[in-house]
């Protein structure tokens, strides 16, 4: 296999063993990018000259016996929405073409301190608000498994770059499955951390300085081990808070399969999942059971799934409403009186959530808190919950109309693409961590991931389960066209 597809920890090991040079490896990725990315369109901003200088410095440091950190010399890219000094951060918006960052995001600084060589940025949808990754500045990113299909969003460029061997490592963000869906669609690994444990400073839409409710940053990679390395690297509060508190996650469990307690949820009444995806989730459950794990498809946190769906959409769209212009907010507010009482469609929920009163938000937050406590009780009896990251495998590009007007085919029937947001919010709104790991291919030849949900601050438990699957069940496989 081409060295470009090796996981980052293996690349770092080869560098330390002097089997490949930092500059040599960087040039290999730059060469692959020049040959492949015209089709995939994953890396939208290059920082080649600065990366070459840093790779040379990394080689010199290693020659002196100095290792900068666990990612010494590893070439990587970051999602376009992360600030890198001197590079544009546009969030896919044409009016932000000249938004040149004057400093690095905290996560970028932490990655470079660990030795990474960052050589560019990867594509996103406008405002990071889609499962597709296209915008008027950088165009459309394609899925390397099938160029006619989406790579996911909003970290779609990140996942596509990893899957096609254009980069060694990536970091993205997630409020509505923006790490998890691309990992699933492209057949790579992704981790959505527990809310609040990694600083999002430098990953915020100007002019805002505060982070969003539910939103997190986290790694994408070609192995579960890489997820842990990056998570431990970027872990910790904003610098303004670091004098008072730090983060130490509970250690990853080291136990045989027979001591794992695994709950499984393959579909939901308010968010049906295609059988092709369900079959791969079931295959993971069957494998765990065959190895002696306690597996249940009945165990659930003690709250209604449909209520959880509604609460998430309300909290999500409330969190993102601050980016509305005054004119857009006023226009939505005027539509509220015309909403059908008890409406359960996404558009109605979005309008109500974007214009709700603070009292209404407080009541929703109370509902969430009750669900968080139900999750806590659930994880006293179960170690992880397995569920789909999305309703289908990667679907064909469709850039017409609003997201809730675009349909995906689930079990032969059309479903609004926004319905599958349930699988983002079921655990995400409760601030829980989850890891997406490859499970193999569906019958259509496209990747399927499994979402491994764990208790709050149980990030390393989720990743540990993914590592066991990686060793014994399924691992990253390059798409045949680019292998």
Image (cartoon, rainbow, N blue to C red):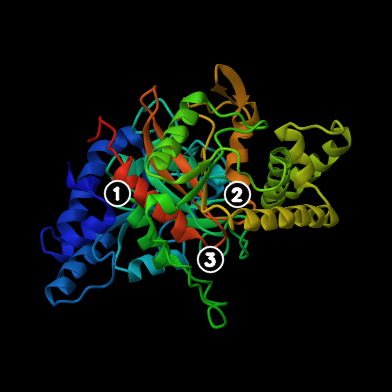
Please state the horizontal and vertical placement of residue 229, each as a whole percent of the image.
35, 62
Nearer the observer, 282 or 353: 282
Residue 245: in sight, yes or no? yes
| Tally of numbered tags | 3
Q: Position of residue 231 (x, y in %)?
A: 42, 62
Residue at which label 2 appears: 427
- Separation of marks 1 and 2 at Cα, in angstroms: 29 Å
- Judged left or right of residue 12, residue 105 is right
How far is mark 3 from mark 2, CA to CA? Answer: 16 Å
Secondary structure at badge 3 equals: loop
Nearer to me, 213 or 50: 213
Q: Tell which of 469 and 317 is nearer to you.
A: 469
Label whose residue precedes the other's in the sequence (1 or 3): 1
Q: Residue at x 21, y 68 (%)?
A: 58
Secondary element at tag 1 = loop
Residue 121 seen in render: no
Closer to the observer: label 1 or label 3?
A: 3
Which residue is outermost to the bottom?
243
Labels 1 & 2 near each other (Cβ < 8 A): no
Q: Which residue is mark 3?
A: 197
Classify 10 Å Cα crowding around label 2: few (below 14), some (14-19), many (20 and above): many
Precedes in sequence: disc 3 or disc 2? 3
Q: Which one is closest to the eye, mark 1 or mark 2? A: 2
Q: Earlier in the sequence, mark 1 or mark 2?
A: 1
């Amino acid at each position: 296999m081409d060295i470009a597809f090796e996981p980052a920890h293996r690349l770092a090991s080869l560098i330390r063993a002097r089997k490949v040079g930092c500059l040599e490896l960087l040039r290999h990725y730059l060469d692959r990018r020049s040959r492949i990315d015209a089709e995939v369109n994953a890396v939208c901003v290059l920082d080649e000259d600065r990366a070459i200088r840093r790779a040379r410095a990394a080689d010199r440091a290693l020659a002196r016996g100095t290792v900068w950190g666990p990612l010494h010399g590893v070439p990587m890219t970051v999602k376009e929405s992360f600030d890198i000094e001197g590079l544009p951060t546009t969030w896919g918006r044409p009016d932000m073409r000249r938004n040149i960052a004057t400093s690095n995001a905290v996560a970028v600084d932490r990655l470079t301190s660990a030795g990474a060589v960052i050589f560019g940025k990867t594509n996103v949808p406008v405002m990071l608000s889609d499962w597709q990754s296209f915008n008027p500045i950088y165009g459309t990113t394609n899925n390397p498994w099938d160029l006619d299909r989406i790579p996911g969003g909003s970290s779609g460029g990140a996942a596509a770059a990893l899957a096609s061997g254009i980069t060694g490592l990536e970091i993205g963000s997630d409020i509505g499955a923006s790490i998890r869906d691309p990992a699933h669609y492209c057949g790579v690994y992704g981790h959505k951390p527990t809310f609040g444990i990694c600083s999002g400073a430098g990953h915020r839409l100007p002019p805002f300085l505060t982070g969003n409710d539910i939103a997190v940053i986290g790694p994408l990679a070609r192995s579960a081990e890489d997820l842990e390395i990056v998570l431990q690297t970027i872990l910790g509060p904003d610098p303004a808070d670091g004098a008072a508190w730090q983060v130490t996650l509970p250690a990853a469990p080291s136990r045989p399969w027979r001591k794992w307690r695994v709950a499984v949820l393959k579909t939901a009444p308010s968010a049906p999942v295609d059988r092709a995806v369900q079959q791969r989730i079931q295959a993971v459950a069957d494998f765990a059971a065959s190895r002696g794990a306690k597996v249940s498809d009945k165990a659930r946190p003690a709250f209604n799934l449909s209520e959880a769906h509604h609460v998430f959409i309300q909290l999500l769209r409330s969190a993102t409403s601050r980016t509305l212009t005054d004119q857009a907010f006023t226009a939505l507010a005027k539509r509220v009186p015309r909403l059908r009482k008890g409406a359960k469609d996404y558009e109605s929920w979005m309008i109500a959530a974007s214009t709700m009163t603070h009292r209404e938000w407080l009541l929703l937050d109370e509902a969430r808190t009750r669900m968080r406590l139900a999750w806590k009780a659930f994880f006293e009896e179960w170690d992880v919950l397995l569920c789909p990251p999305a309703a289908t495998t990667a679907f064909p590009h469709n850039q017409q109309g609003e997201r809730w007007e675009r349909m995906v085919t689930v079990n032969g029937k059309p479903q609004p693409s926004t319905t599958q947001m349930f699988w983002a919010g079921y655990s995400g709104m409760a601030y829980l961590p989850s890891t997406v790991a490859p499970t193999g291919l569906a019958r259509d030849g496209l990747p399927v991931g499994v979402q491994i949900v764990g208790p709050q601050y149980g990030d390393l438990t989720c990743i540990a389960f993914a590592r066991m699957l990686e060793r014994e069940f399924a691992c990253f496989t390059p798409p045949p066209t680019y292998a």
